[in-house]
Amino acid sequence: MSEGAETDETADADPNLRIAVTGAGGRMGTEVIAAAVDREDLAVALAVNRSETEPVSGVAVDPADEFAERLDAVDPDAVVDFTGPESAVAYAEACADAGVPLVTGTTGFSDAQFAALEDVAKSVPVLKAANFSRGIAALRRAVREAAAAVPDYDVEVTETHHNGKRDAPSGTANTLLDDLEDVREDLSRNGRVHGREGDAPRQPGEIGVHARRAGDVTGEHEVLLAGNHEVLELTHRAGDRGVFAAGALDAAVWLADRPAGWYDFGDVIDDA
Ligand SMILES: NC(=O)C1=CN([C@@H]2O[C@H](COP(=O)(O)OP(=O)(O)OC[C@H]3O[C@@H](n4cnc5c(N)ncnc54)[C@H](OP(=O)(O)O)[C@@H]3O)[C@@H](O)[C@H]2O)C=CC1
Ligand SMILES: O=C(O)C1=N[C@H](C(=O)O)C[C@H](O)C1
């Protein structure tokens, strides 16, 4: 048993929601654990990471290859995952085997990996969100309404992130694109143009998609709507990763007693 993690003796005495955190050594994993340690309503009962297993905010970190075994032993109320697509699917399948709900913020899934997550949701509740900030949830609603109100305006989506981000465009940008294509019949996935160069005049039905990587930018998303001699720019800027961690932990508290199925962050916000 890892020191620092909850012991069996305290398990019954501790009324908190007990969570497991994967990717504990990562940018988001460390943020989630730090935020959890500061909250009264939950405790970190298990934390794993693939390489570094130094304690995080005083919480012991176990090797990722022990996850399935430790999950059975610890039996947390939910797992919070911010890792990478391959690992997230493996962690999700372990959650299905152990009957533990999963909150995942990981992005960059292939269609096959996404289908594997949907399969897990047949066994346990799965809540997936590319962005756990309430501001992006609000931006999504504003974008859907604005885009529908100007059905013939050109649309461009730009996202900016730190220079360590692996996937492009961001999961949030893909979610905004899905929203735009849902409310605008002239827009579809085939119309997405990722960057432009050479002789590239805009075609009808195009959405320009631009991914910028620089410095330590936490996460910025802009939807531009232009036409009829005017421009709308709808923008969200995340100040720090604590905004995502707070949303993910709120989602874990919300998800812990739900039935098996597929959920998203909007379900949490709408239930507040
Ligand atoms: N939904 C949301 O609100 C947010 C989502 N994200 C997403 O969360 C994910 C993680 O972001 P971030 O914390 O910045 O990433 P980091 O690279 O900082 O951390 C990833 C962590 O996951 C571990 N890991 C395990 N398997 C993989 C894998 N296959 N690929 C990459 N890492 C793996 C890493 O372990 P090791 O270091 O030992 O390899 C590391 O501890 C990304 O997909 C990102 O887009 C990020 C912020 C907010
Ligand atoms: O990798 C990040 O940092 C982030 N990734 C998420 C995404 O891909 O949308 C969410 C947030 O923008 C930060």
Image: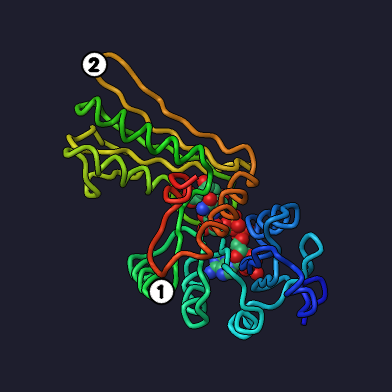
Q: Disc 2 marks which amino acid?
A: Asn
> Mark number for residue 177?
none
- Relative to 24, 79 lies left or right: left
For residue 165, say whether it is visible. Answer: no
Residue receiving disc 2: 228
Helix, strand or loop at label 2? It is loop
In the rendered image, the vertical position of residue 112 relative to residue 175, given as above or below: below
- Is ligand 2 less than 8 Å from the beta carbon at label 2? no
Q: In this view, does 22 lie to the left or right of 268?
A: right
How would you rate the neighbour count of disc 2 (Cα within 10 Å): few for under 14, some for 14-19, many for 20 or more? Answer: few
Give 47 or 174, whichever is nearer the viewer: 47
Residue at position x 75%, y 57% in the image: 37
Q: Position of residue 158 (x, y in %)?
A: 42, 37
The residue positioned 47% from the left and 58% from the top of the image is 107
If the image is split into quadrants, where does the N terminus sit? bottom right
In percent of the image, x 63 and y 66: which residue is there? 19
Q: In the picture, residue 227 is in which quadrant? A: top left
Decide: few, some or many residues near mark 1? Use Cα within 10 Å; few <14, some 14-19, many ≥20: many
Instruction: Give the colour scheme of this rendering.
Output: rainbow
Q: Nearer the viewer, mark 1 or mark 2?
A: 1
The image shows residue 88 at horizontal and vertical percentages of 50, 69
- Which circle's residue, 1 or 2, is located before the other in the chain? 1
User: Residue 18: image x %, image y %?
Assistant: 66, 67
Residue 120, numbered circle: 1
Figure quadrant of residue 137: top left
**Residue type at numbered disc 1:** Val
Camera-nearest residue between 214 and 268 = 268
Q: Distance between the residues labelled 1 and 2?
A: 47 Å
| Residue 20 makes an appearance in the image | yes
Rendered image quadrant of residue 226 = top left
